[in-house]
Amino acid sequence: MMMMMMMTMGKSNSMVSTRSSFVILFVMALIILCQPYEAQGIFEKYHVNITNDLGVGYVLKVHCKSKNDDLGWKLLDNGKFYEWSFHMNFLHTTLFFCKMEWSDIHSGSFVVFDANRDMVRCDTVCFWSARQDGLYGYSDVHTQKTDYYFKWSS
């Protein structure tokens, strides 16, 4: 009888231990899956940089948003830039778009970060240059090779 009780206790302890291990592994997996993920490195931040290259005397009005964040209106004098950083979500659906206006007749809404398009294209920084003929996108500010171009609406 005593032997049978010890065997039953051994099985119970073993089952509790197995359940506890499973719960711990499950919680760890959830924590890892909920963490931001970037293609270039774990926990690395992405940046978007928008520069006013319209010319002397032109102010660029910029209002950027994502599904979760409204960054508000920014006013950029010529040569000034606005930059923010963020972590891409695990599902790679992070999207930022900006409404831009200048000289009261030129405006447009542009997607300045789309995870599917930009997680590899931009490395970690997406550069945008607002010029009089449109918005230019660069993956690397040093090469000045245009990846994207959007015209202003009039």
Image (tube, rainbow, N blue to C red):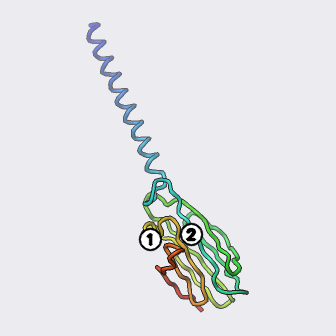
Graded by Cα atoms within 10 Å as few (under 14), some (14 to 19) or many (20 or more), the crowding at tag 2 reads some
Residue 152: horizontal and vertical position, in percent?
57, 88
From the viewer's perspective, tell me whether residue 38 is left or right of residue 129. left
Graded by Cα atoms within 10 Å as few (under 14), some (14 to 19) or many (20 or more), the crowding at tag 1 reads some
* Residue type, label 2: Val
Above or below 53: residue 15: above
Query: Residue at the location (69% across, 81% down)?
Result: 78
Q: Are marks 2 and 1 in contact (CB under 8 Å)?
A: no
Q: Nearer the viewer, residue 48 or 101?
A: 48
Q: Quadrant of residue 135?
A: bottom right
Name of the residue lying farthest toward the front: 142
Residue 41: horizontal and vertical position, in percent?
45, 56
Q: Which residue is mark 1?
A: 121
| Tag 2 secondary structure | strand
Residue 149: horizontal and vertical position, in percent?
50, 84
* Residue type, label 1: Arg
Above or below 128: residue 2: above
From the viewer's perspective, tell me whether residue 109 is left or right of residue 103. left
Name of the residue lying farthest toward the top: 2
Above or below 152: residue 93: above
Q: Earlier in the sequence, mark 2 or mark 1?
A: 2
Residue 67: horizontal and vertical position, in percent?
54, 66
Q: Which residue is mark 2?
A: 48
Q: Quadrant of residue 12?
A: top left
Query: Residue at the location (68% across, 73% down)?
Result: 73
From the viewer's perspective, tell me whether residue 51 is left or right of residue 148. right
Rendered-image quadrant of the N terminus: top left
From the viewer's perspective, tell me whether residue 42 is left or right of residue 4. right
| Tag 1 secondary structure | helix
